[in-house]
Image (cartoon, helix red, strand yellow):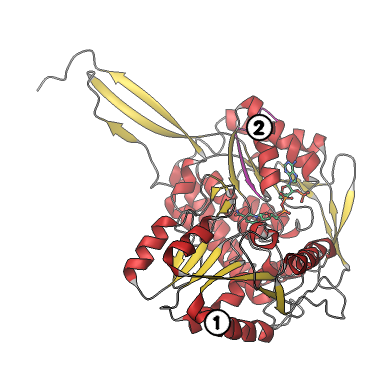
């Protein structure tokens, strides 16, 4: 399966070339070699996909299926993802350059997501409101309509699943726009959706340039809902494009999350666990703890332990079972990190390890640790989206909170402390959508995920996501008079 070298679009459930026949080469970041030729969608393909989706929605195809039936189809998708897990993981590892162990975890998490929403199908419903007027007031949750789901290249299958599963389970047709660099597992997902029994007109997967396919989807009045993950600047542009049609939009955007390590914490464990919370996925993770705030009494010892673990990270071929960090997605993305390392040096930060380009093919970069960082420096304020960690000392709880909050983002973060009262105070004071105490894990299928400030709008995962894929309708049934007893 992973050896397939040509991929068509999926338009209304059917694999076909782009209307204009365009194809693009998709590369393998670890080698720079072409991995596959992929059809490149354009405006006519968007029109076909949305025409089918809107017609299906208007006819009640899928939306009028009982919720339990939709849930059963999603459960089959989860089963198919598990059945094809190894092929999908290898495909993702090669296309996105991620270590095979991480790719396996992601395919499993994508299956978990479909399973979770399969189970949620008949557990998300409206309410009956006790109103003063005689009668019955019912609040219904109705599907919103065709959904345009636009995803980035860092977790291609997983983030697609976070959008596709809740959108479908609520009864909506989906048009998925994968990132141009990583369309392969999204196209496989599209095939599996149809195989599992999602009606063909309700499934399209359109790889193609964001400025063409993404923009056409967002601007089209047939799209009822846009769910986007990607850069903050792209999210802002999407809001503007969606504005004339008042299209519903949710956004998962960038981050510059803080890992706050207090002197009272088990800081040795924090130092051992945090490198992969910054350098995992080669730092291309919106939840990366790219600012590590360390209380001064343990700062130097923490840096020593953290740096030792970082140096020991195995940066290698994604298909090697022992690899912990793969290449960046492209040479251009690596260039961004290298430019930030230069900028950091100009700003006065000191590189204590990494930052070297290994002598091998592929977009590899050794994980870099910057110390003597001031939170006002650009390396501390801007999302680098590469393997660069900034370590910043602080004195006391108040300064920790001030520094953690002093960035335009608010997506994720960690607090390491053994003081429960402090954990409660600081977690309430940090303005971010997701926090972990004495852990660096941000994402759980069952819990809401999303950001404050410029990190986004709305939430994915958990039952919270479902609200974004439904409209609330209130119906009052007048009984004419109060019921007789
Ligand atoms: P981009 O914003 O460049 O792209 C994301 C997706 O949007 C791609 O499919 C892209 O297509 C598409 N796109 C680009 N321009 C437009 C447009 N004008 N209209 C509609 N769609 C468009 O982000 P990256 O792919 O570079 O992803 C990295 C960014 O994503 C990082 O900043 C990161 O923080 C953020 N991110 C946030 C997450 C979160 O949950 N908060 C999770 C993961 C990443 P194409 O590929 O063709 O350019």
Q: CA distance from mark 2 to mark 1?
A: 46 Å
Range shown magenta: 220-229
Would residue 185 be found to the left or right of residue 401 on screen? right
In this orientation, which residue lies closer to the viewer: 271 or 351? 351
Tell me which corner region of the image, top left, top right, bottom left or bottom right, holds residue 157. bottom right
Specify few, some or many for label 2: CA neighbours under 10 Å numbering under 14, 14-19, or 20 or more.
Answer: many
Q: Which residue is mark 1?
A: 302
Reply above or below: 479 against 437: above
Reply above or below: 219 against 434: above
Would residue 147 be found to the left or right of residue 16 on screen? left
Q: Quadrant of the C terminus?
A: top left
Reply above or below: 396 against 215: below
Q: Quadrant of the N terminus?
A: bottom right
Tell me which corner region of the image, top left, top right, bottom left or bottom right, holds residue 291. bottom right
**What residue do we see at 33% from left, 70% from top?**
420
Point out which mark residue 473 bears: none
Q: Which residue is mark 2?
A: 242
Horizontal and vertical percent position of residue 89: 68, 69
Specify few, some or many for label 1: CA neighbours under 10 Å numbering under 14, 14-19, or 20 or more.
Answer: many
Q: Can residue 24 be seen?
A: yes
Horizontal and vertical percent position of residue 53: 65, 35
Would residue 466 be found to the left or right of residue 164 on screen? left
Reply above or below: 116 against 67: below
Horizontal and vertical percent position of residue 444: 48, 62
């Amino acid at each position: 399966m992973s050896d397939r070298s040509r991929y068509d679009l999926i338009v209304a459930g059917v694999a076909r070339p782009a209307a204009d026949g365009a194809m693009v080469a998709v590369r393998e970041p670890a080698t720079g070699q072409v991995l596959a030729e992929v059809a490149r969608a354009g405006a006519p393909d968007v029109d076909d996909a949305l025409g089918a989706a809107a017609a299906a929605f208007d006819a009640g195809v899928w939306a009028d299926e009982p919720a339990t039936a939709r849930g059963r189809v999603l459960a089959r998708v989860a089963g198919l993802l598990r059945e094809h897990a190894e092929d999908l993981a290898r495909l993702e590892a090669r296309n996105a350059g991620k270590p095979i162990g991480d790719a396996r975890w992601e395919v499993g998490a994508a299956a978990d997501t479909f399973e979770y929403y399969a189970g949620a199908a008949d557990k998300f419903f409206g309410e009956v409101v006790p109103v003063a007027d005689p009668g019955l007031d019912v609040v219904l949750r109705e599907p919103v309509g065709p959904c345009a789901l636009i995803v980035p290249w860092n977790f291609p299958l997983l983030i697609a699943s976070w959008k596709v599963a809740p959108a479908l389970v609520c009864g909506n047709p989906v048009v998925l726009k994968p990132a141009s660099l990583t369309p392969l597992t999204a196209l496989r997902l599209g095939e599996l959706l149809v195989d599992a029994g999602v009606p063909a007109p309700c499934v399209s997967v359109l790889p193609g340039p964001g400025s063409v396919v993404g923009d056409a989807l967002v601007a089209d009045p047939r799209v009822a809902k846009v769910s986007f993950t990607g850069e903050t600047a792209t999210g802002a542009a999407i809001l503007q494009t969606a504005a004339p049609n008042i299209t519903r939009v949710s956004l998962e955007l960038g981050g510059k999350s803080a890992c706050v390590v207090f002197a009272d914490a088990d800081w040795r464990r924090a130092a051992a666990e945090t490198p992969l919370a910054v350098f995992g996925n080669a730092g291309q993770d919106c939840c990366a703890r790219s600012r590590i705030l360390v209380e001064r009494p343990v700062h130097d010892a923490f840096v020593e332990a953290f740096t030792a673990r970082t140096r020991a990270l195995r940066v290698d071929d994604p298909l090697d079972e022992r690899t912990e960090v793969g290449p960046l997605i492209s040479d251009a993305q690596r260039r961004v990190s290298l430019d930030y390392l230069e900028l950091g040096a100009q700003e006065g930060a000191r590189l204590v390890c990494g930052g070297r380009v290994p002598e091998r093919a592929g977009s590899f970069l050794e994980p870099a640790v910057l110390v003597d960082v001031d939170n006002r420096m650009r390396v501390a304020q801007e999302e680098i989206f590469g393997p660069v960690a900034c370590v910043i000392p602080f004195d006391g709880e108040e300064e920790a909170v001030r520094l953690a909050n002093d960035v335009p983002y608010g997506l994720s973060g960690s607090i390491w402390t053994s003081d429960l009262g402090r954990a409660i105070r600081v977690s309430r004071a940090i303005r971010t959508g997701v926090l972990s105490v004495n852990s660096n894990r941000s994402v759980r299928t069952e819990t809401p995920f999303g950001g404050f400030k410029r990190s986004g709008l709305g939430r994915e995962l958990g039952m919270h996501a479902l609200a974004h894929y439904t409209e609330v309708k209130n119906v009052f049934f007048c009984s004419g008079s109060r019921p007789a007893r």
